[in-house]
Image: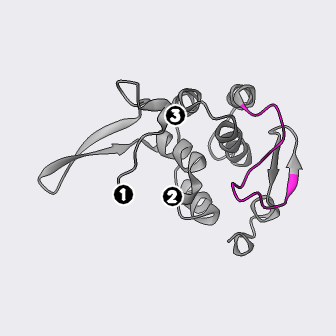
Amino acid sequence: MPVRAAPALRALIDLGGGILEQHHAGGTVRVTTLERALVDVFDQPAKSGGWEEIWRSLELVEFFDLDAVIDYARKLGSAVTAARVGFFLEQHRESLMVEEVHLEKLRAMGPEQLRYFDPKRRPGKLVSRWNLVVPEPLLSRSFEEVR
């Protein structure tokens, strides 16, 4: 599905990076790297099928270049997105080999004031290290309730 680059990236020659050209059906299409996709789904979750699909899809990936994730999140310039990415990576710290230095960089980009993880402002529990109110179903992974 074609998606326009975020306004913060449109002026950049490479649109923020993380875009590859692939041959498809006799032509060429541009696709994002896994690292850019990780950040983009947390930036625009409505275009990503919902939290359960985001979580389950990202959990299928065995490796992310975390420096590329952080670099792209910085270019995007959204504090809430940086915190969402950081929260996800923290939840998958072991499996994705996330080090504290990665989380610290994302925390430094995160919101200074309390924000909701879910754009629909669903209630949840405050995760103070990310300054996010995270819906309980994401914390407990009971996705059936997140609709």
Name the residue carrying label 2. Answer: 47
Position of residue 15 measured from the top left corner of the image (x, y, whole percent): 39, 31
Label whose residue precedes the other's in the sequence (1 or 2) = 1
Boundaries of the magenta span: 110-125
Q: Residues within 10 Å of mark 3 (few under 14, many from 20)?
A: few
Q: Quadrant of the N terminus?
A: bottom left
Q: Which residue is mark 3?
A: 65
Indicate the amino acid at tag 3.
Asp
Amino acid identity at mark 1? Met
Residue drawn where x is 63% and y is 35% of the image: 78
Q: Where residue 20 sits: x, y (%)? A: 31, 38
Residues marked 1 and 2 touching at CB (< 8 Å): yes
The chief SS type of the magenta part is loop
Q: Earlier in the sequence, mark 3 or mark 2?
A: 2
Query: Could you say whether the residue bearing mark 1 is in a helix, strand or loop?
Result: loop
Q: Residue furthest left?
A: 26
CA gap between label 3 and label 1 equals: 24 Å
| In the depicted structure, whether residue 20 falls above or below residue 133 | above
Label 3 residue SS: loop
Q: Disc 1 marks which residue?
A: 1
